[in-house]
Image (spheres, helix red, strand yellow):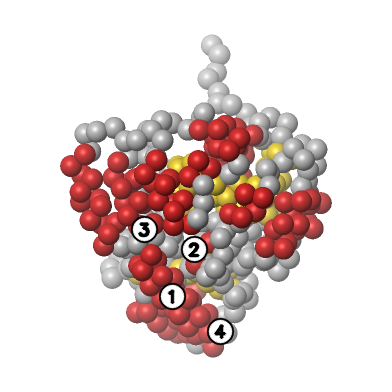
Amino acid sequence: MAKIVPQPGIMDIALYEGGKSKVDGVSNIVKLSSNENPFGPSEAAQEAVRRAVHEMHRYPSTDHTPLRTAIAEVHGLNADNIICGVGSDEIIHFLCQAYAGPGDEVVHTEHGFAMYKISAKAAGATPVEVKETERVTDVDAILAGCTKKTKLVFIANPNNPTGTMIGMAEIERLAEGIPPQAILVLDGAYAEYVEGYDGGAKLVEARDNVVMTRTFSKLYGLGGMRVGWGYAPKDIIDVLNRIRGPFNLSNVALAAAEAAVKDAAYVEKCRAENTRMRTWLAEALMEHGVPSDTSTANFILARFADQEEAEACDLFLQKNGIIVRRVGGYNLPAALRITVGDEASCRRVAHTVGLFKAGER
């Protein structure tokens, strides 16, 4: 009898592991493992959800026009060049499904987001990992890793889990230098945390080979709603919409995202508070002998002497009710990614790391 098997590459995919949210036997947990906004969604987004529950029996819009229009107005973009998805993850998946397959290659950096590799393999393509330089995206390494088989090049800017980013001049050089059949994808999940940074939107408008992805899961505090979007040349948007499910986003999620993107005052408040506590946390950890690169996102990549120390610190933090993220799966076994929480959470994690470094176990 013939054996039922999945498409080649599917069983090579390692399951994505999200940040832990509980520790057995420990209460009063502080979760700093998933880069969530500690202040949650704005009141405007919450009110939009309360109103939307009365329409849960209705099918949602198939073209997301109200949300795309709101995004376009806030960011100064063309609504026709926007596509909405179930988090930016779905846009990444669409790109791999539409533009990469067996015999094709998808380039990503060694500390890049896990979904690049997962989505590439799901499409039957071959992921190609290139080196970073001191945890920073290396344009020359990416260009050297491209071949005639390269169809997609993914970089997160700012990057997760390193928190580092490269300047627009380097991004432009990358867009100019990749092979003619390839698309450069700028993952801007953390772009809102960088004051004055457009995530690469102007570059998308200037070229035909660049796509930008964004999310409502981080600064906007809507991780549980799963809403993301992409900005791309119209030809690419047309392709992606052909494989997008017509009802991929719910009425409730669409309403929450539309209200959230319009609430500029709340966005600015969350950005400013994140910047303040990110600076404080990095300095506090450094005082305890735990260095980190300058982060431009909502987390710190805390570096330890080796994997053993990093894992021991993680266990000590868990024992004290603090959950952070191990990043060995991102080729950073001697580091822990710590979300920038509210002031109380930041002070608690810094104090506890200090106790660990002082010899408590």
Q: Residue furthest top?
A: 1
Marks 1,4: beta carbons within 8 A: no
Instruction: Tell me the residue that label 2 is attached to.
Output: 192
Is 119 or 155 nearer to us in this picture? 155
Query: Where 245 falls versus 35 (above or below)?
Result: above
Asked if one can make out residue 241 in the rendered structure from this viewpoint, the answer is yes
User: Which amino acid, mark 2?
Assistant: Glu
Instruction: Tell me the residue that label 1 is attached to.
Output: 272
User: Which amino acid, mark 3?
Assistant: Lys
Instruction: Tell me the residue that label 3 is attached to.
Output: 262
Q: Does dot 2 land on a helix, a strand or a loop? A: helix
Locate residue 105 relative to residue 357 in the image: left or right: right
Q: Does dot 3 land on a helix, a strand or a loop? A: helix
Query: Where 49 falls versus 333 (above or below)?
Result: above
Q: CA distance from mark 1 to mark 4?
A: 22 Å
Assess disc 4: are there few (<14), some (14-19) or many (≥20) residues with their C-alpha within 10 Å of its C-alpha.
some
Residue shown at the point (42%, 84%) measured from the top left: 351
